[in-house]
Image: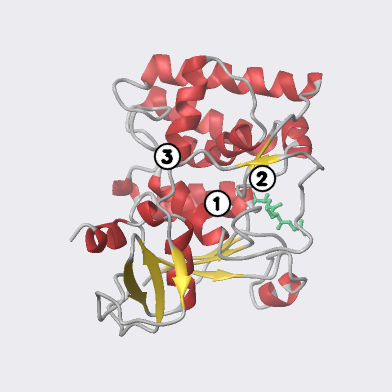
Amino acid sequence: MAYHLYIGDRTFSSWSLRGWLMLEKFGLPYKTTMVGLYGGTMAADLAHLPGAKTVPVMQTPSGGIVTDSLAMGETLHEENPTARLYPKDPGARAMARSLVAEMHSGYGALRDACPHNMAHVLDGFAVSDAVQKDVERIAKVWALARETYGGSGPWLFGEYSLADVFHAPIANRFTTYGIKLPPAAQAYVDEHTQDLSNRQWRAMGETVTYDPFPYDMGLPTKDWPIDVISAKPVAAGPSENATCPYSGDPVTHYLETGGRIFGFCNAFCRDKTVADPAAWPKFMSLLNG
Ligand SMILES: N[C@@H](CCC(=O)N[C@@H](CS)C(=O)NCC(=O)O)C(=O)O
């Protein structure tokens, strides 16, 4: 039996990203349903889940409904003790829980001024004093965690934990708004930017287009700082592969990259691959033979 995660638009919904990472990163079984956060149908889409009001919402295999991302993390930690959502060491775990809780309840100035937007980087964002205070506090707690418990791993407590789940959307915001950081904090942000799960989430978000596009703030845009292999959708095959690299079903939708054509079983799988081919190991092993 799997968890059922209800999410909003990936490009913008930072809380949904948390919900997804806490299942995806720890290898827990789940299926995802996207609700109409920006399409106006969210209330109706969540109406069958008692108590649900915002996204993410998670239904547990035994039918429990969890309507808040902090509660989801605690529930998943409790139900999956061997998945190691929190660090094993009690001191590290205490600090990780504190960072998670502070992220959940704090940093209002940063959140308000910098909506989560993984579509592109915005050039020339002016940082207010209140935002700067949040940035400095975050860089300080990141340094404390990394220096005390980071060891040789790249994440806050060495191995990826719920603390990284909760800070991934903040790292994305720092990227979007070009926030100036000390080198160690920037290195941690870069780790999130290059993380394949974060890239996959972004690529899935890129399959949706918005007109008008929210949150541009009238600022010039730059590309998101990842190396994207050039690929484009094409109308027809034949493709090198007969079955979809993700589902194993017969191919119906196609992309072209480097003069080669590959097929997928639906438009979403094709378009998420076009958005960032290197984010998808199953596609990359097809591409690299
Ligand atoms: N405390 C909630 C907050 C979730 C939240 O505010 N989600 C936003 C989307 S990113 C939302 O659903 N907003 C719609 C609304 O507030 O009506 C959690 O941690 O899950």
Of the residues shown, which amino acid type is indicated by label 3? Gln
Secondary structure under tag 1 reads helix
Secondary structure under tag 3 reads helix
Specify the label residue 194 is tagged with.
3
Disc 2 beta carbon < 8 A from ligand 1? Answer: yes
Residue 221 in the image: x percent, y percent? Answer: 68, 41
Marks 2 and 1, how far apart at CA: 10 Å
Earlier residue among tags 2 and 1:
1
Q: Nearer the viewer, mark 3 or mark 2?
A: 3
Horizontal side, residue 289 vs residue 3: left or right: left
**In this figure, which residue is indicated by the disc labeled 2?**
116
Q: Is residue 94 visible?
A: yes
Q: Residue at x 74, y 74 (%)?
A: 41
Specify the label residue 17 is tagged with.
1
Figure quadrant of the N terminus:
bottom left
Q: Are marks 1 and 3 in contact (CB under 8 Å)?
A: no
Residue 215's place in the image compared with 106, above or below, is: below
Disc 3 beta carbon < 8 A from ligand 1? Answer: no
